[in-house]
Amino acid sequence: MIGGLAHCGRILDIVITPIRRRPSLLVPFLLWSTAEALPAFTTGHAVARAVDDGFAAGRPLTGLGWLAVLGASWAVAAVGARQILLLLASVVEPFRDDLLSRIVGGTLSRAGTPGDRADTAAVSRMSHQVELARDSYAAVITVVRTFVFTLVSVVLGLLTLMPEVLVLVLPPFLVGLVLFLASLPALAGRQRAFILADENTAESVATMVAGLRDITACGAADRTRATVGSAVRRQARAAHVLARLTAVRTLALAVGGWLPVLLLLAGTPWLIREGAGPGVILGALAFVMQSLTPTLGSLVQGLGVSGVRLAVTLDRILETECRPASTAPSTALSAAPDGSVPVGAAPRLELRGVVFAYGAGAEPVVSGLDLTVHDGDHIAVVGPSGIGKSTLAALIAGVLRPQRGEILVDGSPTGPAMAHARVLIPQQAYVFRGSLAENLLYHAPGTPAPAIERAAEAVGGAELVRRLGGLHAQVDPGALSAGERQLIALVRAYLAPARLVVLDEATCHLDPAAEARAEEAFARRGGALIVIAHRLTSAARARHILVMDGTRVSLGVHERLISESPLYADLVGHWRTASPSPA
């Protein structure tokens, strides 16, 4: 089971470490386990002797004496069980503390790593999953220890009682055990799917709760309900599949635990011919029904639930530990604009050796990027879908932070203090409930109405302002089309004091003419403009074009890139043959 998981070696190390740290516990652990397993050896013998040598032979005191021996063995086992629980606590609690240290350390390390998202699922790991792991660890130690000592005791007991009984008992028991162990990898996979679904649900709910106000303001309640509901349904399906697979445990228990009883009963005539008396038959049944079958049931339940849960939970926890940052080679690019920029002019934006990857160990999306943008520059960023264009936009806007390198806006590192210096408009434009003026003046409160009207006219939103009823009209985000929301966001950005504007496919829902008008307005506005392009016309209008292909980055003008960049040439060919985007 554990061997098939991704971190099997480290899981085994975590499991063994608490025991290895306390070697002095091993001897008392073995001694008290032997004491606890004493009834498993004495039960069959006491029953057989009490019947054959005592009650059946007319010596009731002898029979009672053997039953007293059985009672004494149970008293010793009770003391042993108590001592085992005390020893178990000395192992389980350090195990729990070690898991908490790993999760907290890993989460804090990632939280301090630039560009990493907040790990909302860490709460689930620190509370629910650590408790699951601790309880499962205790259960696994208990059932495995009990199974081993009980099995040895029963086998020794049957050998000393009547070796022939083992022929009827041991083969089906081993078949049931093998059947159960063979099902563990599949159980581990299903348990892992359930835990991941549980984490996803926790993260979805946490995100929803944190954004309730924005969800209501944007009229996104239905979409959010669908997203969270989908996560809940996935978790329910994972739970159902896991429940169906656990039916294998019942079959293993039937074969290994109860088939030996049937074989003993069916083989009684043969055992009697071999010299067994009634007491031996009853003693053999006592060995199986009082010791062997219950301990197999405990093992099936313990490993099938607690063991699988422990392995998968530890595997998941280890995945979230802080790992070294990627050491992928850098692909550096010097992308400063050409001599058209006045010598000595301070750059509006600088990227110096920027490296960014989503998650520790992942391949960088942006690797070793150098870029310098001055006032008056208009750069279009192009590349295949998913190559990292929106990631670059988010880095420039300060939404993401690089793992290595630095990003400067107006000579200062990007961060909350520099929020006024740049503005990002994403593809999904944000509009909130309130008046149209409140939406447009979010970044520039106090702007007079004539300036607002000029901005709306320049960007192409004047007709929308009139259609909505003027600046004091109330806006319902859910009643607006995607293009209308983009126009409102464009006017808002145009009015902002920021001198660096990043349009991340911010005009994708506009027709080509409206898109051209908006981009040309921002180009004339002053400052620097970076456009994540999704049409050839956006690239053709730009002063420079930045081509991203994942392994190398090229900067140039349209004509030069057509001949020097095969990727850009392919993109241009695709754009030219594609149908115009709908308005």
Image (tube, rainbow, N blue to C red):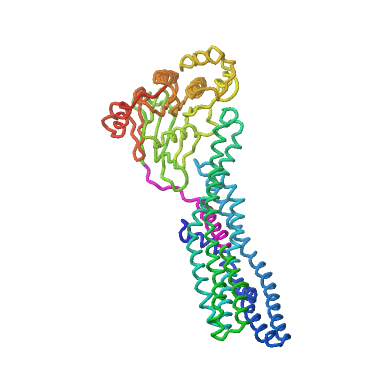
State whether residue 305 is above or below residue 209.
Answer: below
Q: Main secondary structure of the magenta part?
A: helix
State whether residue 261 is above or below residue 15.
Answer: below
Residue at the extreme left: 563
Pick the front one: 430 or 172: 172
Q: Is residue 48 magenta?
A: no
x then y, percent, for residue 223: 54, 33
103 relative to 501 in the view: left or right: right
x then y, percent, for residue 244: 53, 54
38 relative to 419 in the view: left or right: right
Q: Quadrant of residue 569?
A: top left
Q: Is residue 388 visible?
A: yes
How many numbered dots are placed on residues in this image? Answer: 0
x then y, percent, for residue 527: 45, 23
x then y, percent, for residue 12: 51, 62
Residue at the extreme right: 61
Pick the front one: 533 or 443: 533
Q: Is residue 422 visible?
A: no
Highlighted range, magenta:
301-330
State whether residue 466 is above or below residue 184.
Answer: above
Q: Is residue 312 magenta?
A: yes
Q: Quadrant of residue 261?
A: bottom right
417 relative to 551 in the view: left or right: right
